[in-house]
Amino acid sequence: MANIKSAKKRIKVIETKTLRNKMIKSALKTYIKKFEAAFEAKNVEESKTAFATVSKALDMAASKGIIHKNKAARKKSRLALKLNSLNA
């Protein structure tokens, strides 16, 4: 356990940030699952709106440093391929 005041504060700050990061990652997974469900149901309109939500959430997570920007780009690309295959 930390004895120095600043170290104690850092522990609290890290716990807060970890919790926030977990919440955002969990929300990302939920958005992706909703997109996948709409895709499996072959619902084009719902898939488009879900993709927009996922895309925005991935960009936000990448900009905050929660996930790497290349991971966000890769996920968006793969989901876009699925969406385009549904339209074709």
Image (spheres, helix red, strand yellow):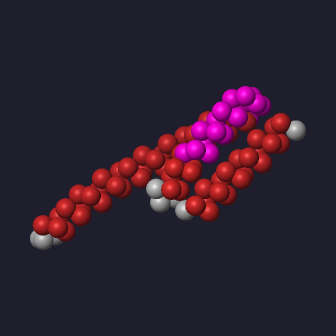
- The correct choice, above or below, for 66 with respect to 7 in the image is above
- The correct choice, above or below, for 3 with respect to 67 in the image is below
Q: Is residue 15 left or right of residue 40?
A: left
Q: Residue furthest front?
A: 63
Q: Is residue 74 left or right of residue 24?
A: right
Residue at position x 56%, y 51% in the image: 59
Figure disc tally = 0
Residue 69 at x, y = what percent? Answer: 58, 61
Q: Quadrant of the C terminus?
A: top right
Q: Quadrant of the N terminus?
A: bottom left
Q: Is residue 52 magenta?
A: yes
Residue 56 at x, y = what percent? Answer: 58, 44
- The correct choice, above or below, for 82 with respect to 74 in the image is above
Q: Which image quarter: residue 40? A: top right
Residue 46 at x, y = what percent? Answer: 69, 29
> In this rendering, does residue 17 appear at all?
yes
Residue at position x 41%, y 53% in the image: 21
Q: Is residue 48 magenta?
A: yes
In this picture, which residue range is highlighted in magenta? 40-57
Residue at position x 62%, y 45% in the image: 55
